[in-house]
Image (tube, rainbow, N blue to C red):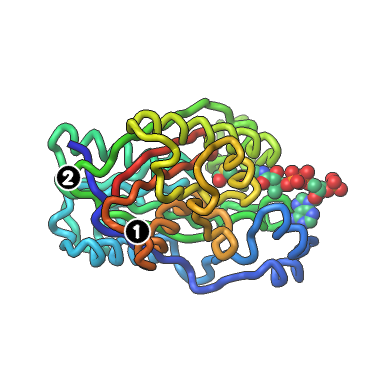
Amino acid sequence: MSFNIIGTGSAWPRCSKSNEELSQIIDTSDEWISTRTGIKSRHVSTGETITDFATEAARRALEDAGIEPGELDLIICATARGEYITPSLACLVQKRIGAHCPAFDLNAACTGFLYALDVSLCYFETDRAKKILIVAAEAMSKLLDWTDRATCVLFGDGAGAAVLSEGDGLLSIKIRASGNEEPLHIENTEGNCPFSERGAATQFLKMNGKDVYKFAVSSMCTDLQEVIRGAGLTQDDIDFVVPHQANMRIIETAKKGLSIAPEKYRYNIDRFGNTSSASVPILLDELNQAGELKKGNLLALAAFGGGLTSGACVLRW
Ligand code: ACO
């Protein structure tokens, strides 16, 4: 027994900042950002907390699925950092929507939604859940060094959610990790322990863009090829590719290593930037709400990110 996605939702902070607006406070330009990444604007939390937009995405997914919070058997939040270290974001979402099931966070950076799907599969296979809510949410704006133009222009805030129900929609899934903090990391707080011999942490995202770029392209190609083969399908069979929205050039380069027709790829990076784990479910929700996804369509999802982690899956809608 695997699962079907029976509802999706998404939400993000109201404030959207264009490249032009960033160029008024940072030494950058719309031309540099657009040509290198495809990003035109991104959402940035001002007053809202990550719990606010994670909860809103969850409510919309439940409404789309037509189920009550009380029917949920599990909530998994994929996030690099919730509102608190504890309680988890999942517990806060559980409280706000009025659910009574177990809830926990999972951190696989930008691959978090794929990791959460994989964990959910175990619950369905062992008959421990009939309905699971996944919420992938990130407040990247709080993790960035806004004096580092090489990273702060790339990311955005947002949340995407999906309700899973027992079914046979998941045809194949693969997640990977290859532990290496050099290409991308965010330091954790050091606290004020008087015995610590380490200096204060920066708590800002640090990235070697070129290394991440190479990893992203190769993992997206390898993972998609593997899950499509694993589902007993050919690349021609896929109706939609929903790739992690990190950089338009990564997707364009990966496309050349795959034989899926170019018009089957979907994007929204221009309006959201890289929302890390939230990017795949936000895009999935956009396609769902636009009525693009028809019953029986075959979807390939792929993501990659810090860890380094990557993952992909094939779903029948
Ligand atoms: N505006 C203007 N100039 C800039 C900016 C900016 N915002 N940022 C960097 N530059 C400058 C640099 O200083 C450098 O100048 P120099 O040549 O005088 O030294 C020049 O632009 C080129 O910088 P590069 O880093 O070589 O630019 P590159 O073409 O490699 O593009 C980028 C950088 C967009 C980050 C690219 O490497 C990339 O997309 N990498 C993948 C990153 C990614 O996808 N990360 C997310 C995945 S993981 C996750 O999602 C958590």
Residue 293, label in figure: 1
At horizontal 40% and vertical 56% (from top left) the residue drawn is 284
Q: Nearer the viewer, residue 145 or 228?
A: 228
How far across and how far down the image is residue 29, in percent?
77, 63
Q: Nearer the viewer, residue 192 or 39?
A: 39
How far across and how far down the image is residue 72, in percent?
17, 53
Relative side of 176 to 249, left or right: left
- Amino acid marked by disc 1: Leu
At horizontal 13% and vertical 36% (from top left) the residue drawn is 127
Relative side of 10 to 14, left or right: left
Q: Is residue 122 above or below residue 5?
A: above
How far across and how far down the image is residue 10, in percent?
39, 63
Residue 17 appears in the figure: yes
- Cα–Cα span, label 2 and label 1: 19 Å
Q: Residues within 10 Å of mark 1 (few under 14, many from 20)?
A: some
Q: Is residue 219 above or below residue 24?
A: above
Question: On the image, numbered disc 2 is attached to which residue?
Answer: 166
Relative side of 45 to 82, left or right: right
Residue reaching furthest right?
27
- Amino acid marked by disc 2: Glu
Element under label 2?
A: strand
Is disc 2 in contact with disc 1, using a CB cutoff of under 8 Å?
no
How far across and how far down the image is residue 226, in percent?
43, 29
Q: Is residue 309 above or below residue 134?
A: above
Q: Earlier in the sequence, mark 2 or mark 1?
A: 2
At horizontal 68% and vertical 57% (from top left) the residue drawn is 146
Element under label 1?
A: loop
At horizontal 46% and vertical 42% (from top left) the residue drawn is 302
